[in-house]
Image: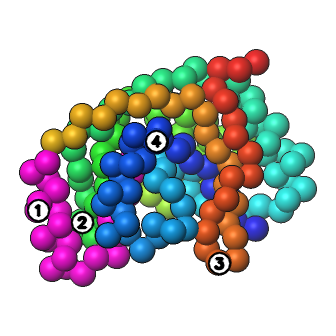
C-alpha cells in the first residue's frame, strides 16, 4: 500500500489555499491542503504497525511544536506548472523532514524538500502564466503552528486518508 506523511495546516490557512485549489488543482477532492513532509512510499501494513508507527511516535515525542509563515506564492516552473504557497524555511521544518527519512522509514528522496502548500497544478502553459502572474502580485501574511503530523494512506480512487496522527512534543 502507498503511504505518505503530511502536516495539515490550520483551518485559516486551508481556507486560503482552498480558495485557489478549487479552481486550479485537480487533486482538490483527493486531499485537503497540506505540507508534504515525506514523499509517498510503499509499505506492508504489518511493517507500518510493527516498525514505522513506533518510530513516528518517537520522532513526534522528540520534536517540539513550531511556527511557520506564508508570505508569497512560488512555483516549480519550468519543471512543472505547479503554484504553491511558500512556507518560510526554518530549521524546525527541515529537521522534522530529515527525521522522517531515517531509521526504518524509506530513505529515497526524488526531490529536494521544498516546504509548500500546493494551490494549483497541471495547468496549461498559458493558464500557468496568467494565474502565476496574478498571484505573485498578492501579499500573504499567514502565521501557523505545527503541533502534529499525519501518516496517510492512499485509497484505490487516489484519495488520501489519515492512518494515524502524531502530536509533537508529547512523551
Q: Is any atom of residue 91 visible in this view?
A: no
Give the CA separation, mark 2 to mark 4.
Answer: 28 Å
Q: Nearer the viewer, mark 1 or mark 2?
A: 1
Q: Position of residue 25 (x, y in %)?
A: 38, 69
Above or below, 166 relative to 112? above
Dot 3: what SS? loop
Question: What residue sits 61% from the left and 74% below the top?
Answer: 158
Which circle's residue, 3 or 2, is located before the other in the chain? 2
Q: Which residue position is annotated with label 2? A: 77
Residue 57 painted magenta? no
Residue that badge 4 annotates: 11
> From which residue to which does the magenta span run?
115-138
- Tag 1, which secondary structure? helix
Q: In which quarter of the image is the C terminus?
A: top right
Per the image, the residue denoted by label 1 is: 133
Viewer-proximal residue among 57 and 142: 142
Spatial CA span between label 1 and label 3: 33 Å
First in sequence: mark 2 or mark 4?
Answer: 4
Amino acid at each position: 500500500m502507498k503511504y505518505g506523511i503530511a502536516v495539515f495546516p490550520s483551518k485559516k490557512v486551508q481556507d486560503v489555499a482552498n480558495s485557489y485549489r478549487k479552481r486550479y488543482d485537480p487533486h482538490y477532492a483527493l486531499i485537503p491542503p497540506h505540507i508534504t513532509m515525506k514523499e509517498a512510499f510503499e509499505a506492508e501494513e504489518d511493517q507500518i504497525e510493527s516498525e514505522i508507527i513506533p518510530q513516528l511516535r518517537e520522532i513526534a515525542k522528540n520534536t517540539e511544536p513550531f511556527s511557520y509563515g506564508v508570505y508569497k506564492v512560488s512555483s516549480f516552473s519550468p519543471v512543472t506548472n505547479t503554484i504553491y504557497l511558500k512556507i518560510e524555511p526554518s530549521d524546525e521544518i527541515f529537521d522534522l523532514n530529515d527525521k522522517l527519512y531515517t531509521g526504518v522509514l524509506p530513505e529515497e528522496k526524488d526531490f529536494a524538500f521544498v516546504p509548500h502548500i500546493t494551490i494549483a497544478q497541471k495547468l496549461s502553459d498559458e493558464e500557468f502564466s496568467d494565474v502565476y502572474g496574478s498571484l505573485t502580485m498578492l501579499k500573504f501574511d499567514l502565521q501557523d503552528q505545527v503541533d502534529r503530523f499525519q501518516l496517510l494512506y492512499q485509497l484505490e480512487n487516489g484519495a488520501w486518508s489519515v492512518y494515524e496522527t502524531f502530536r509533537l512534543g508529547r512523551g
